[in-house]
Amino acid sequence: MKYLGNSSRYGMLAGLSALLFLCVDVPGQWGPDLQDNALCFRYLGCNAGFGGYDALCHFLFGIAFALGIYWFCRRWPRYSILHEQYWKGALVTLALVGLFAAVWECLEFTFDILAVIDLHHPLTHLQELQFLAQPTNADTVGDMFYGMLGAICGIIVLAFV
């Protein structure tokens, strides 16, 4: 796999992109809750449908996941599923990112079902939809779109490294 380059370079890129993702995502998910912050909503739209803070997190994760796949396949070529030609390997990477995104969104949907039906989480107001992981179809499609867009950007970066 001559196009895969140096594994240490890919490891550094994958590590930096994962660190960037964690620096953005962790404070918003488990920190001072940036998703509900008025500044976040003003500049990024937070979790308001298709874009916002949630979209930024999914975009960064798409980059990190795609770079991680390339790093893994270069580091352990015996377990590589990437093709020797660059674009065929890119398509396999996009398929893996898409599969992971679909499974992730299904898990979020399952958690919402558990919260609403089994735990009897009340949904008496439209405002309470913001507490769901999947409040709308636009949020689900946006999450998957931005994850794939991030993966495409990561693959393009690898073409020039």
Image: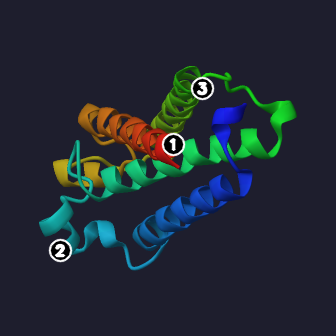
Distance Cα–Cα, label 3 vs label 2: 42 Å
Q: Secondary structure at mark 3?
A: helix
Measuring from the top left, give residue 66's x and y in whole percent: 55, 42
> Toward the viewer: 66 or 50?
66
Instruction: Determine whether label 3 and label 1 are within 8 Å by CB.
Output: no
Q: Residues within 10 Å of mark 2 (few under 14, many from 20)?
A: few
Distance Cα–Cα, label 2 vs label 1: 26 Å
Q: Is residue 88 above or below residue 160?
A: above
> Toward the viewer: 136 or 122?
136
Question: Which numbered circle lies on residue 75?
Answer: none
- Amino acid under label 2? Ala
Which of label 3 and label 2 is nearer to you?
3
Q: Is residue 77 above or below residue 60?
A: above
Provide the residue designation for mark 1. Answer: 111
Q: Secondary structure at mark 1?
A: helix
Judge from the rendering whether residue 10 lies leftward or rightward of residue 38; answer left or right: right
Measuring from the top left, give residue 80's x and y in whole percent: 77, 31
Provide the residue designation for mark 2. Answer: 38
In primary-sequence order, the first of circles 2 and 1 is 2
Provide the residue designation for mark 3. Answer: 89
Judge from the rendering whether residue 74 lies leftward or rightward of residue 21; answer left or right: right
